[in-house]
Image (cartoon, helix red, strand yellow):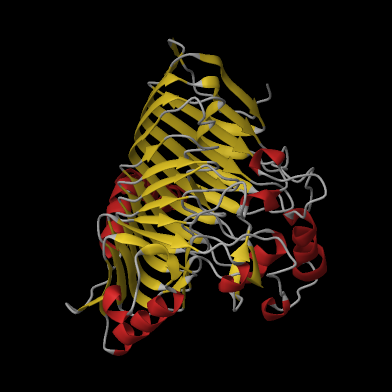
Amino acid sequence: MLFNTFYKMHRIKGLALLGAILLFASCKQKESQAFDPWKQMTQIVDSITLPTFRADTLNILDFGAVADGVFDNTDVFRKVMDTCSKAGGGTVLVPKGRFLTGPIHLENNVNLHLEEGSEIMFSKNLDDYYPLVHTSYEGTELMNFSPLIYAYKKKNIAVTGKGVLNGRAGNDFWWPWCGKDSYGWQEGAPKQHSSLKKLKEEMSEVDVPVNQRIFGKGEFLRPTFIEPFSCENVLIQGVKIINAPFWVIHPIKSVNVTVDGVVVESHGPNNDGCDPEYSKNVLIKNAVFNTGDDCIAIKSGRNEDGRRVGIKSENIVVQNCKMIDGHGGVVIGSEVSAGVRNVFVENCTMDSPNLERAIRIKTNSKRGGVIENVYVRNLKVGQVREAVLKINLFYGIYGIQKGDFIPEVRNIHLENVQVKNGGKYGILAKGYAQLPITDITLKDVLIEKVDAAYSLENVTNLNFINTRINGKIMQTKSNSLEH
């Protein structure tokens, strides 16, 4: 009798525990099934605040601007920007014509609008890029030449219209500083490498305050083109941007940034099309990128400077863009020390014999960083040279870079991707044995004309769902791979 009672009691407890376990598992399964990253993307896009402006319009001609491509309109732009902002904001209109100027600094609540047929030409006089401003070079903060269009701690700002922004960089100005003869550098001429070494080894690595990292004339670090720094509610729309000194559109430490319908045509060194850095809620859509470097490159600081700042780039959405020439279509890295997460790419086309990769992640153990939650869908690729998806965690453009910060890459999804000519590899991925790349999924992907389906090292959970490479149905690989 006593035994039967004891047995029944423990059987009831066991069934209750089993029921709780099953209920928990069911809830977790439903939670997993319920999560839709594309709904998350929609929520991010809906949350991005566009700037709004008063109806007032100020024409730069009314402030003494001259459209002959020779007269220096720097003071005109400064005066009209200040006047417009102090009056509560509105539109600064650049009418048809060619206007020469030094850097333009945007002010709160002002839309710089370029009428169709207008062109802003930027100065080739280094003195015009003074006073030096708080900016960044390849993921390291410093005081340097002003970006060509700059805003610092501003809200509700825009650059819009159908005009042209011409940085006038070329083999005679700005570009030779990269140190390559293909961009006009000649033996014995100055170049950026000595300045970069000074910035890194003598300043960033020993934590010199940013306001004491003084560069400018006598150093050789080129300015970015459009840089909203620590700004909120930014719109860059419609304009064509050519001949950039360095990175083209560089939102840094900014929130709610929309880049819409721009055309970037600039084949200079480091001419990345758009580089969100330490930024959140960034929408890049309807744009054309034809560049000398990555079309879009998402950043979050380099090495110790990125870890010092410690702001992830997150909630980055790329929609309906066209990538032509470039080192990569959508790239994360290489300066990603603070990490990148929640990147969404959809409905884009990529096609050029000069486009090297479609989707690329690059960093190393000196830079580190956690890169996670990258979702790509509805991508049409005509031709890329090296790989459709490349993940290189041993990136070393300045030589071998090793440190104690092993990067983490996880949760990369490609869906409904069609590639006509994939180059050398469908997937080229190399991770670390102690911290492998994990959870790559290709669903409904069709890749044609690649030399090899994949080359993998230290990758776990590579999932193929209805995916064909070179006509062969691909099988899921759950274990660490070496090839």
* Residue drawn at (39%, 39%) of the image: 376
Q: From the viewer's perspective, is residue 150 above or below residue 394?
A: below
Q: Is residue 120 left or right of residue 304?
A: left
| Residue 448 lies in quadrant | top left
Q: Quadrant of the C terminus?
A: top right
Looking at the image, residue 135 sits to the left or right of residue 470; the answer is right
Q: Against 284, is 233 above or below?
A: below
Front-most of residues 202 and 447: 202
* Residue 254: % across, % down: 45, 69
Q: Position of residue 175 (x, y in %)?
A: 62, 50
Q: Is residue 400 left or right of residue 296?
A: right
The residue depicted at 70 percent of the width and 69 percent of the height is 217
Instruction: Check the image and report above or below for 348 versus 225.
Output: above
Would you say residue 389 is visible in this rendering? yes
Q: Is residue 303 above or below residue 232?
A: above
> Which residue of the protein is positioned furthest toward the left in this rendering?
55
Residue 15 in view in this figure: no
**Which is nearer the eye, 474 or 328?**
328
Number of numbered discs visible in the structure rendering: 0
Q: Residue furthest bottom?
A: 86
Q: Residue 228 at what x, y percent from top left?
A: 45, 68
Residue found 79% across the figure and 43% down from its top: 400
Task: Locate residue 216: give its quadrant.
Answer: bottom right
Q: Quadrant of residue 215?
A: bottom right
Residue 165 is situated, as x and y percent measured from the top left of the image, at 40, 57
